[in-house]
Image (spheres, rainbow, N blue to C red):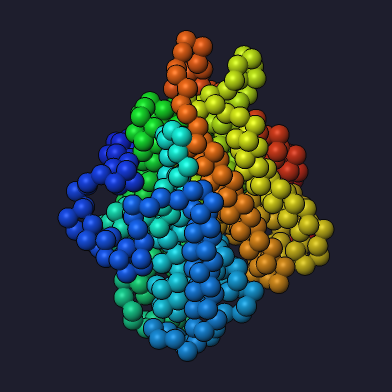
């Protein structure tokens, strides 16, 4: 399938599913009856009775935030203990030992924050119980936390003179039972039908080409793979992630996985429009996300199809064979031939535009500009559809900043969805915006001045900087992907990356909830002829412009020292070396 046809098919499917998925979620979080209620509602009520939750009682933003933080703290402790005590737990056929404390801390933080950064080889490190009861459970509830926060912020825009923004326990339960679990079941069944393993068997012994015994890992793969994609988690059952044939065996499964990553984030844009009473507002957000997405796909695909001129100039053939067809040119290094350049480039943009982090090719082997796009996608806050919930509340923060700037330009009090944007709202939005670069650039600067961190690079010079910068960008952005050119399971990177994940998740969520609480308390102003419209091309262009300008002002110097200088070196016949 050509590049254009693949992109058209993908975006067409995504566009067709956005409204029905978004409408369903709007009904779920508004407490309306849905097609799943006859089956799921009794389970939901049973959970409330068991836990003592009153679904009719709502929370102020402070109570909502405390409940969210305590729940995630409990999740961290459970995942940490499962790893540390793994050797004595059941469902551990390989008798894998307990995880070293710093690595266990890093992994527990990673899965609780929806990052799923993995500095280890999962198939030879984690037992089945740890995978299922710890990591897979967090794939659901960490994603549900993001959705709950997004819905709380939407209520802030939608409500008038209210002190409450919802009930965290109810939002968490409904996001899991009505949205994440049903979609994951359907996808897991599809994956099993396409050849993805789902069992509790011991590893299979086989004889290698040299006569040696080879152990082939397997296990409950499909049940983790489905929420990994649906919940934009990204943590793989195998170290090769979605490049592994047991996780992603065919071009069809690859296509479905790409759709799954954007499905809920895209649907939430329609949910937003529906809940605030104007679906055009949701489509405007969708359009802004789509514009940024298409630019990223174009740059990455062209860069990867162009390949490395150092190979062409040396007379080496860059002809590749993909699905039995000969394709001239392009950078196929660290890409699977069953996917090819187009599907690998598209997957890379999707997984970093969302906070997923699953990979079907190694970004470390992309061309400099091809690798810069995934880096920039995360650095912008993953608002190009983004993670489940995180993408929506991230771009709504940018919307607050954009409307504030518009108000300054025309000399009017800024309003968004009828809510006056006042100093407190701008302060909370700016706090959210500053969290990412402070963590990303701060930790990267420390790492570049630390011998232990520099020794973890697999490459020196500009590419080595990109490897370290990508690691802290991915951690702070709760993405979890890596350049695959850095040894991060070290005494330096395990705690620092863990802290970056915590900062990127919870130091963003708390001010967002504060913003939601402040907005919910306000009255909605009447729309007049002087009200700045926030549904047309002018607004979409302004929003996209603010996102790009903030990103450029923040990260351009770092990118110049990394992928940009490496690109010009490559064009001039200079390449990095391990020597």
Q: Residue at x 69, y 51 (%)?
A: 439
Question: 457 or 328, which lies in front?
Answer: 457
**Based on the displayed image, in which of its 4 quarters is residue 145 positioned?**
bottom left
Q: Is residue 388 visible?
A: no
Query: In this rendering, does residue 539 appear at all?
Result: yes
Location of the N terminus (image quadrant): top left
Residue 217 vs residue 302: left or right?
left
Q: Report the residue that reaches farthest toward the top.
A: 529
Position above or below: 291 against 62 = above
Please tell me which residue is depicted at 71% across the width and 58% down the height of the picture: 459
Residue in front for this viewpoint, 459 or 354: 354
Question: Which residue lies at the image location 38% right of the left edge and 46% below the top edge?
Answer: 264
Horizontally, is 339 left or right of 496 in the view?
A: left
Q: Residue at x 36, y 66 (%)?
A: 52
Residue 446's x, y, as percent? 78, 57
Residue 156: image location, x then y, percent: 47, 38
The mark tally for this picture is: 0
The correct choice, above or below, for 528 with respect to 363 in the image is above
Viewer-proximal residue among 136 and 293 = 136
Residue 44 position within the rendered picture, expressed as x and y whole percent measured from the top left:
28, 60
Image location (x, y in percent) of residue 532: 51, 17
């Amino acid at each position: 399938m050509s590049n254009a046809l693949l992109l058209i098919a993908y975006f067409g499917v995504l566009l067709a599913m956005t409204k029905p998925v978004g409408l369903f979620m709007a009904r779920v979080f508004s407490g309306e009856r849905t097609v799943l209620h006859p089956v799921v509602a009794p389970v939901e009520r049973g959970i409330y009775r068991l836990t003592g939750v009153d679904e009719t009682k709502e929370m102020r933003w402070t109570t909502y935030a405390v409940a969210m933080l305590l729940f995630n703290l409990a999740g961290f402790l459970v995942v940490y203990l499962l790893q540390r005590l793994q050797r004595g737990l059941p469902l551990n056929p390989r008798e894998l030992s307990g995880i070293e404390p710093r690595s266990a801390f890093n992994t527990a933080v990673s899965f609780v924050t929806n990052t799923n950064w993995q500095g280890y080889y999962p198939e030879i490190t984690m037992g089945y119980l740890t995978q299922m009861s710890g990591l897979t459970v967090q794939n659901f509830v960490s994603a549900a936390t993001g959705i709950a926060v997004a819905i709380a912020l939407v209520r802030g825009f939608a409500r008038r003179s209210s002190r409450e923004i919802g009930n965290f326990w109810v939002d968490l339960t409904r996001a899991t039972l009505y949205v994440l679990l049903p979609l994951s079941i359907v996808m897991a069944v599809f994956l099993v039908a396409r050849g993805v393993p789902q069992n509790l068997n011991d590893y299979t012994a086989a004889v290698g080409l040299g006569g040696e015994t080879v152990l082939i890992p397997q296990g409950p793969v499909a049940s983790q793979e489905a929420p990994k994609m649906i919940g934009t988690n990204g943590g793989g059952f195998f170290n090769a992630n979605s490049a592994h044939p047991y996780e992603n065996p065919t071009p069809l499964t690859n296509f479905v996985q790409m759709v799954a990553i954007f499905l809920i984030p895209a649907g939430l844009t329609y949910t937003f429009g529906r809940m605030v009473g104007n679906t055009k507002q949701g489509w405007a957000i969708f359009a802004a996300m789509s514009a940024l997405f298409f630019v990223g796909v174009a740059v990455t695909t062209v860069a990867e199809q162009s390949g490395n001129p150092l190979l062409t100039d040396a007379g080496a053939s860059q002809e590749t064979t993909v699905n039995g067809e000969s394709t001239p040119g392009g950078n196929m290094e660290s890409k699977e031939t069953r996917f090819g350049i187009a599907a690998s480039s598209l997957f890379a943009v999707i997984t970093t535009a969302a906070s997923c982090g699953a990979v079907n090719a190694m970004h470390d082997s992309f061309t400099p500009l091809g690798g810069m796009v995934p880096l920039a996608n995360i650095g912008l806050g993953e608002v190009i559809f983004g993670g489940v919930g995180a993408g929506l509340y991230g771009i709504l923060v940018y919307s607050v900043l954009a409307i504030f700037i518009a108000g300054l330009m025309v000399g009017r009090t800024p309003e968004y969805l009828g809510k006056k944007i006042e100093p407190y709202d701008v302060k909370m939005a700016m706090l959210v915006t500053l969290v990412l670069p402070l963590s990303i650039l701060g930790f990267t600067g420390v790492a570049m001045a630390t011998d232990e961190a520099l020794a973890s690079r697999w490459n020196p010079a500009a590419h080595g900087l990109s490897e370290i910068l990508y690691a802290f960008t991915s951690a702070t952005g709760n993405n979890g992907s890596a350049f695959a050119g850095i040894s991060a399971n070290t005494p330096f990177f395990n705690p620092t990356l863990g802290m970056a994940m915590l900062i990127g998740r919870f130091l963003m969520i708390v001010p967002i909830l504060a913003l939601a609480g402040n907005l919910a308390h306000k009255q909605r102003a009447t729309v007049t002829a002087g009200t700045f419209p926030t549904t047309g091309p002018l607004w979409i262009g302004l929003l996209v412009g603010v996102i790009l300008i903030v990103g450029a002002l923040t990260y351009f110097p770092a990118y110049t020292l990394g992928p940009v200088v490496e690109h010009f070196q490559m064009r001039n016949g200079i390449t990095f070396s391990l020597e």
